Image (cartoon, helix red, strand yellow):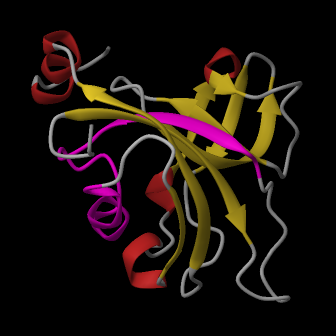
Amino acid sequence: MRIQKNCMVTLSYRLLPTSAAAPPAPEGPFKMQVLVGHDRLPPTLEQELLGLSAGDRLDLELPADAWFGFPSEATVTRLPLSAVVAPGAPQVGQVHHIMDENSSLKPFRLVAIEGDRVLADFNPDSPGSSLRLGITIESVRWASIDELKRVLQPVAPGR
């Protein structure tokens, strides 16, 4: 099956340095599952994935304007420590992830641990820098009705 709108795609990826001056960051591998065609990925990345199948590999450099935005105080927030997706104990200064209500991983830099909460900075590390990804498509399938509903129905406030 080829990747197209309303497909659920599982992919593994590595973050690859674009230059010797790139800031240090975990390389991965990381794994994610994403619904295609519903603004869950940067448009440039989604466009490159369309038409690929399980087993295909892609080495892609995304320019800064396709990946990074501008820093903002509004993207620094407190989260429950239990929401942090980490292979071990979360470390201050490292990039970690949370899973949102649509099962998409959201990266952030851990600024502080405050008891059972963390201060998470969702600003990009390198505005103006490109990002290179080494991607392997692991599986492609049609999204279930429930998966489509989760993306298409707004989340109620407070959830």
Instruction: Identify the residue at image location x=18%, y=47%.
Output: 37
Left or right side of 82 for 107: left
- Where are the magenta residues, as a range? 28-51
Instruction: Identify the residue at image location x=72%, y=69%.
Output: 16
40 vs 141: above or below: below
Q: Where's residue 76, x and y in %?
A: 56, 50
Instruction: Identify the residue at image location x=44%, y=40%.
Output: 54
Left or right side of 97 for 87: right
Where is the N terminus found, in terms of image quarters? top left
Instruction: Identify the residue at image location x=80%, y=54%.
Output: 26
Q: Where's residue 90, x and y in %?
A: 83, 31
Q: Where's residue 158, x and y in %?
A: 30, 16
- Residue 71 belongs to the span the image colors magenta: no
Q: Where's residue 149, x and y in %?
A: 13, 18
Which residue is nearer to you in this view: 155 or 20? 20
108 vs 128: above or below: above
88 vs 126: above or below: above
Where is the C terminus found, in terms of image quarters? top left
Residue 147 lies in quadrant = top left
Left or right side of 126 for 21: right
48 vs 51: above or below: below
Which residue is nearer to you in this view: 106 or 139? 139
